[in-house]
Amino acid sequence: DVKVTQSSRYLVKRTGEKVFLECVQDMDHENMFWYRQDPGLGLRLIYFSYDVKMKEKGDIPEGYSVSREKKERFSLILESASTNQTSMYLCASSPRVSNQPQHFGDGTRLSIL
Amino acid sequence: AQRVTQPEKLLSVFKGAPVELKCNYSYSGSPELFWYVQYSRQRLQLLLRHISRESIKGFTADLNKGETSFHLKKPFAQEEDSAMYYCALYSNYQLIWGAGTKLIIKP
């Protein structure tokens, strides 16, 4: 069974801090994704990666960056956290083969004070 | 533009009643559509995909290209069906998501 693990379930940080969210998958998937999930807005794609060291902007990349140094790990970085980045963050992975389902982690609920 | 619309933010039905969660899409081409579900305090997970033509937990969804819809249906709702449901469209390595419908099953 696919396992996508996010490093923290809950995280509280202060405005202006640099925040790292980590995600690891164990199924050798090529594609990895970072979303934020907000009530009434559904899932919005922040960034995705289809290979090591490759990244593509999603719908809302502003204020975020990502790193994919190894195939199994995809990190989301908030360069200077702001209160409007308080949200639930979801990581997902999928095989490169087209239209395969995405597998999700448990999510990280991030609060920026 | 590619888009997925779930017109209902909240749907509340009684246990044993039929359920229909609406999903409409906009896509030029042959769509690949999914339904995902998130139960309380659980991770988002795939419920079903249209190419499988399967029934999962009593739910079915039929792709209607004429109406550009992919509604999720279940003839008799159960309390454990209470969850958040998302419709998603595959496009260019990504999924385009609807805003989600919260389904509440009343006892």
Image (cartoon, coloured by chain):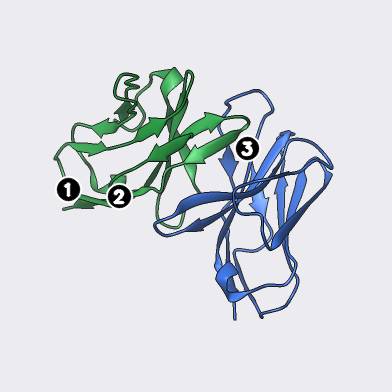
Chain colours: A blue, B green
Query: Residues at badges 2 and 1 in contact (C-beta under 8 Å)?
Result: no
Query: Which amino acid, mark 3?
Result: Val
Q: Tell me the residue at 17%/36% (across/down).
A: B18
Is A20 left or right of B44, judged from the image as shown? Answer: right
Is B94 left or right of A43, judged from the image as shown? Answer: right
The residue sitting at the front extreme is B1
Query: Which amino acid, mark 2?
Result: Ser
Q: Splitting the image into 4 quarters, where does residue B66 fall?
A: top left
Helix, strand or loop under label 2: loop
Q: CA distance from mark 3 to mark 2?
A: 24 Å
Reading the image, the residue beneath label 3 is A2
Q: Tell me the residue at 84%/42% (across/down).
A: A53
- On residue B82, the disc is 2
Is B40 left or right of A84, judged from the image as shown? Answer: left
Q: Splitting the image into 4 quarters, where does residue A64 fall?
A: bottom right
Q: Nearer the viewer, mark 3 or mark 1?
A: 1
Graded by Cα atoms within 10 Å as few (under 14), some (14 to 19) or many (20 or more), the crowding at tag 2 reads: many
Q: Quadrant of the C terminus of chain A?
A: bottom right
